[in-house]
Image (spheres, helix red, strand yellow):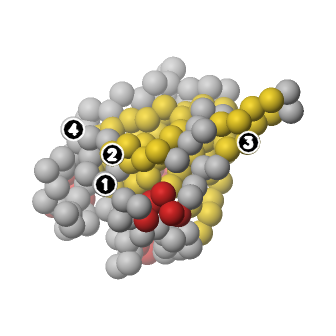
Amino acid sequence: MNLVELALPGVFRLESPVWGDDRGFFREWFKGLDFESLGLNFVAAQANLSYSQSNVVRGLHYSMAPEGQAKVVTCVGGSLLDVIVDIRIGSPTFGQHVSVALEAGDGVGVYLPAGVAHGFCVSAPNATLAYLLSSPFNAPMELEIHPMDPALGITWPIEGEPLLSPKDAAAPTLAFRQDAGDLPLFVG
């Protein structure tokens, strides 16, 4: 597995070989030793799957859990655009985002360090995202930022109005979260 750091500190694009034949394909999408070789100590505490229809936008979600919550994500069905926003106070890239196109069978995933916000959108008929979490879901510590916050400048490649959950539709802006003291600190 090849880990390539993206424009946000600590965010990595994961590239793994895909071996295919007339039956389908095989891929190793997570190898702990590859992370350790870069000094990343990622231990999965929870695994999730998220299935979404076309025009769904999920996020931007993050955790304020004291132990932090890193993620490893990959698309296992369909295709989607994964978006990571640096919301860590003190980060040199605070408020900036990167996007990574993910498609089932493309051999690509993303590592998100603790303290960044995560979202994705589906422009294909549907998509399934698999993700590993370094800490379990902790409802009172899980927060969100509105994915359409104009200050973030994210272009979501969907047609028409996005399909948002009620929680995401009611989410505040990044500026509101910052003023409220609801953002993680950058540990660099």
Residue occupied by mark 4: 151
Residue occupied by mark 1: 10
Q: Is mark 2 on a helix, strand or loop?
A: strand
Q: Which of marks 1 and 3 is nearer the N terminus?
A: 1
Spatial separation of the CA atoms under disc 2 and disc 3:
24 Å
Residue occupied by mark 3: 26
Q: Is mark 1 on a helix, strand or loop?
A: loop
Q: What type is the residue that disc 2 sits on?
A: Glu
Q: What element carries label 3?
A: strand
Q: Earlier in the sequence, mark 4 or mark 3?
A: 3
Residue 183: percent from left, percent from top: 25, 63
* In contact (CB < 8 Å): disc 1 and disc 4: no
Is 93 rendered above or below residue 81? below
Where, by quadrant of the figure, is residue 87 drawn? Answer: bottom left
Spatial separation of the CA atoms under disc 2 and disc 4:
24 Å
Residue occupied by mark 2: 5
Q: What type is the residue that disc 4 sits on?
A: Ala
Q: What type is the residue that disc 1 sits on?
A: Gly
Q: What element carries label 4?
A: loop
Residue 79: percent from left, percent from top: 60, 31
Point 73% across, 42% down: residue: 26
Q: Earlier in the sequence, mark 1 or mark 2?
A: 2
- Residue at the top extreme? 159
Observer-nearest of 134 and 156: 134
